[in-house]
Amino acid sequence: MTPRLLAFNKPFRVLTQFTDADKRATLADYIDVPGVYPAGRLDRDSEGLLLLTNDGQLQAWITDPKHKLPKTYWAQVDGEPSPEQLDALRAGPTLKDGPTRPADVTVMSEPALWPRDPPVRYRKNVPTTWLEITIREGRNRQVRRMTAAVDLPTLRLVRVGMGDWTLGGLECGAWQELRVPERFMR
């Protein structure tokens, strides 16, 4: 079997699985490639880069925490972060399941993204800020929990990179074939 690797730009409210008993949107609604499975997860309420592969060794390598594969997100947060809040995110806030590793965090301009359906709620008197956050671990809903821990709730979360792979110009709901790293070619 030839190893395959796909990049998918997962839309909002799509489950990171191919079936759902509750008839919610799944990967099967977008990807018709037999034998590929997600390498990691992306919450239903998050958007962006999801890698899929048909190779168990490649899937394990992408998801194994010992490789500390960086994951980069663009997070729209409620409010304007103070220097102290940004420092707390960078240091790695402590969550209910323990301290997080340090993260790279920068304030960024609003990115040119596809429209989200439904749109993020707009409040005239409450500003929002976009942050680029890179983490090197992958706990459940980690970025959302980190921003909430410093009183900056996440309104929209888009993963734009995993390791050397990026979302690039991939349209929302589209997928493309990627080059499999040489070490996984047989």
Image (tube, grey):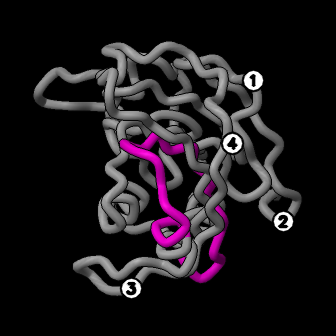
Dot label at residue 169: 1
Q: Earlier in the sequence, mark 1 or mark 4?
A: 4
Identify the element where label 3 is drawn: strand
Q: Which residue is mark 2?
A: 183
Between the C-alphas of marks 1 and 4, the distance is 17 Å
Which segment did they paint magenta?
A: 65-86
Q: Say which amino acid is labelled 1.
A: Gly
Q: Residue 178's x, y, as percent? A: 77, 37
1 or 4: mark nearer the eye: 1
| Image-quadrant location for residue 135 | bottom right
Q: Earlier in the sequence, mark 2 or mark 1?
A: 1
Write the residue at 22% across / 79% down.
96
Identify the element where label 4 is drawn: strand
Q: Specify whether residue 85 is painted magenta.
A: yes
3 or 2: mark nearer the eye: 3
Q: Which residue is mark 4?
A: 5
Q: Earlier in the sequence, mark 2 or mark 4?
A: 4
Q: Say which amino acid is labelled 2.
A: Arg
